[in-house]
Amino acid sequence: MLSLRLIRRLGAAHCNLATAAVSSSVEKISSASSRAGKPSSVDEPALVKLKKERDPEKLFNLFKANATNKIVVENRFVFEDTVSRLAGAGRLDYIEILLEHQKTLPQGRREGFIIRIIMLYGRARMTKHAVNTFCDMHLYGCARSVKSFNAALKVLTDSRDLQAIDWFLNDVPGRFGIVLDTYSFNIVIKGFCEMGILDKAFLVMAGMGIWGLEPDVFTYTSLIEACYKSNCPEIANGLWSRMVLKGCHPNIATFNVRIQFLVNKGRTWDANKLLDFMRRLKRSPEFPDEITYNLVIKGFCKMGNLKMAMYVYSAFRSEGYKPNQKIYQTLIHYFCEAREFDMAYNMSKQSMESNWYPSVGTIYNLIEGLVRDGKLDKAKHICSLALKRKPPFNTAQIEFMKSILSRK
């Protein structure tokens, strides 16, 4: 069977050389075989060339030449990467030509594709183009929904143009028959919170009732976080109580926001109590999560209580979590500060063997501390692990590590 299949493939590949009259069935087999293999020689190089091209004009022309190539335009990464690089080069004119052309093609009738165009304009900070794309969707034969409205609203909110946000949120839905959802309000509330305009954020939340909507956990979490950052813990705690009374349960992000506030205020013991409560609550398999543990560990480290930091670290491991780069970095840094170089060495060894490397400054301090304590073998081992880093440390950094080893 294997030899027969090989003969058929060779026959299909050379059929146009062997005879001028080929039956339609053989042509179909040859075509199917070609599609089943790797991408064609036309499509595959286009993706590779787009990824490698660094000249903005050549990148523009290459993408334009493949404007109808589905393998290119349906590839989200390639599309976003091309627009990002053109924006970085300041060629907004190229971006406009490419995206406006895409709207006229068959994919322009799909709302999901138009949402991508809107978000790409937003990424390039071409806010007006993003809003116009939403308002002109009917011209491409594309139906609107609250999803495309929310995409344009997100771009506007990121622009921080308060007048435009107000117009879009209050006037545009009625114009196009859009019914707002909770996500619409959350976009604006989150945006106002990030701008530090808490009074407007609360007004938007109050306006949700007009649309028959209730704040959800994301609404409350955005406002609680903003209140903590604005040093208004009483309001934040009041929101937490209101959320619970309304039957809206805090999620992992809500808890982490409160723990971050407690740690920032030096109240790490209170943060640890909340962590223990979360462990007992165990609402989901990742409750608490890595961020929760990292915050509390860092809090104890900043207090100088490395014993408690390691206790929390042990609890973290007992829950089945594996240390991440941030936890390693935190512990190694503070062990070096406390001159606990053996502990820092053990942590660094575990971290670097997992290809998670401390900052170069921390590595300098660790090697220097080990040499000073007469533990040259351990210092050399850390240096040898540092040499294996990918991407590598630069030559000057490596030479400095080696120079520390030669100190007495």
Image: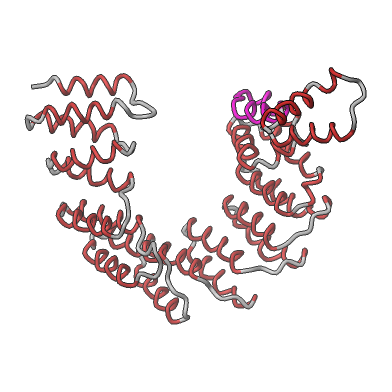
Above/below status of 39 relative to 251: above
Q: Is residue 290 above or below residue 55?
A: below
* Residue furthest front in the image: 1
Give the colour scheme shown: secondary structure
Give the left or right position of residue 248, taking residue 325 as reference.
Answer: right
Q: Quadrant of residue 237?
A: bottom left
Residue 205 x %, y %: 54, 71
Q: Quadrant of the C terminus?
A: top left
* Main SS category, magenta section: helix
Q: Which residue is at 59% across, 65% downward?
A: 183
Q: Is residue 166 visible?
A: yes
Residue at the right extreme, as displayed: 21
Q: Residue furthest bottom?
A: 245
Is 101 or 353 nearer to us in this picture?
353
Residue 164 makes an appearance in the image:
no
In terms of depth relative to the viewer, which is nearer, 147 or 224?
A: 147
User: In the image, what residue occupies the spot 29% across and 20% down?
Assistant: 396
Residue 330 colored in magenta in the image? no
Q: Is 44 placed left or right of 355 in the picture?
A: right
> In terms of image quadrants, where is residue 92?
top right
Q: Percent position (x, y) of residue 152?
A: 66, 54
The residue drawn where x is 16% and y is 43% is 343
* Residue at x-position 19% and y-position 20%: 403
- The percent coordinates of residue 317 (x first, y second) are 27, 55
Residues drawn in magenta: 41-60
**Where does the image place residue 80, in percent across and percent down from the top left?**
62, 40
Residue closer to the observer: 315 or 394: 315
